[in-house]
Image: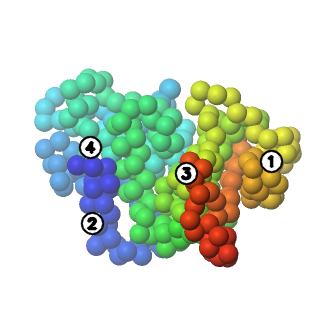
Amino acid sequence: MTPQRAAITLTKILDARDGVDRFDRAPVDPEWLALNYSAQVFSNEPIVVVKGEALDGCVGALVFGETKPRRWGILYDERQDPRRRNFTVAHELGHYLLHREMIEETTPDGLYCSEADVEQGRGSTAIEKEADLFAATLLMPLHDFRKQLGPKARADFTVLGRLADRYGVSLTAVIHRWLDYTETRAMVVISNEGFALWARSSSAAFRSGRFIRTRNAMFELPETSIARSRLASTPGVMSVTQPVGAWFDEPVLETSLRASRLDQEITLLQLDASYDEIPDEPVPDLVDRLAEPHSRAR
Ligand SMILES: [Zn+2]
């Protein structure tokens, strides 16, 4: 069973029960789903508890009782924001549906997931990436997401914030989901005091050589970037068109949000639609593409 298939099965059940317009009314409730779906479909080994605890060093866990038939439980760190909690619970439900046999055999104390494993798609193992993909597919189905923000549309924090409300997830979870399918050249950089913690490009941006390495390298944002130039200033959203040379060898629309709660800046970089793909081969229809209006749907 793939993560997408598992999530789409649940999506179809929820669509049939609540209508395909269900997100107009409420996001998915992964806690309710974990308890009720497992009780109905896997009644011999259901999830019987979903609860918050003070978990140190991890944000969520899938645990099981010692006796058989198995009883399963999902734990989440109670200090999490409710939106992050939704994603964490969905992530653990993904482990239950996809990996519980392996977890029973290999981790007798249950599976504990770090913050990096959950939501940011940086999980070190294949099962963490699968649980993230399951959670994103379940909480933010693309059939609904694409209607809200088309694949050729540019994004801004107003739209992304509205989508975070719609799906009951964090802004970064929404941005990841958008980067999964957008056909625009875009990237996000999460930074702290001007240094990138991580960055991710859309596939179109990546193919054109627009990406930043953060895994084994320290990347300091450009001096003129909003995140660096207003380090000590007030929270909020700012936007500026950066000239050639600031970030890349082309202009960039930079939008930056500094959350007051988190000591982090979220920077969105959006580039024009026309570009040479890397490797640097002549693009036959480049002239035609340059002649077209740039695909700024918004
Ligand atoms: Zn996990």
Q: Secondary structure at mark 1?
A: loop
Name the residue tied to disc 1: 245
Amino acid found under the numbered disc labelled 4: Leu
Q: Secondary structure at mark 3?
A: helix
Q: Is residue 265 above or below residue 274?
A: above
Q: Position of residue 12 (x, y in %)?
A: 29, 67
Residue 207: assigned label: 3
Label 3 beta carbon less than 8 Å to ligand 1 = no
Q: Are marks 2 and 4 in contact (CB under 8 Å)?
A: no
Task: Decide which of tag 4 and tag 1 comes sooner along the chain.
Answer: 4
For marks 2 and 1, give the one nearer the viewer: 1
Task: Decide which of tag 3 and tag 2 comes sooner along the chain.
Answer: 2
Give the alpha-carbon distance from disc 4 to disc 3, as whole Å: 32 Å
Q: Secondary structure at mark 4?
A: helix
Name the residue tied to disc 2: 13
Q: Are marks 4 and 1 in contact (CB under 8 Å)?
A: no
For marks 3 and 2, give the one nearer the viewer: 3
Amino acid found under the numbered disc labelled 2: Ile
Q: Is residue 194 left or right of residue 72?
A: right
Name the residue tied to disc 4: 98
Amino acid found under the numbered disc labelled 3: Arg
For marks 4 and 1, give the one nearer the viewer: 1
Give the alpha-carbon distance from disc 4 to disc 1, as whole Å: 46 Å
Q: Is residue 7 above or below residue 194?
A: below
Task: Decide which of tag 3 and tag 1 comes sooner along the chain.
Answer: 3
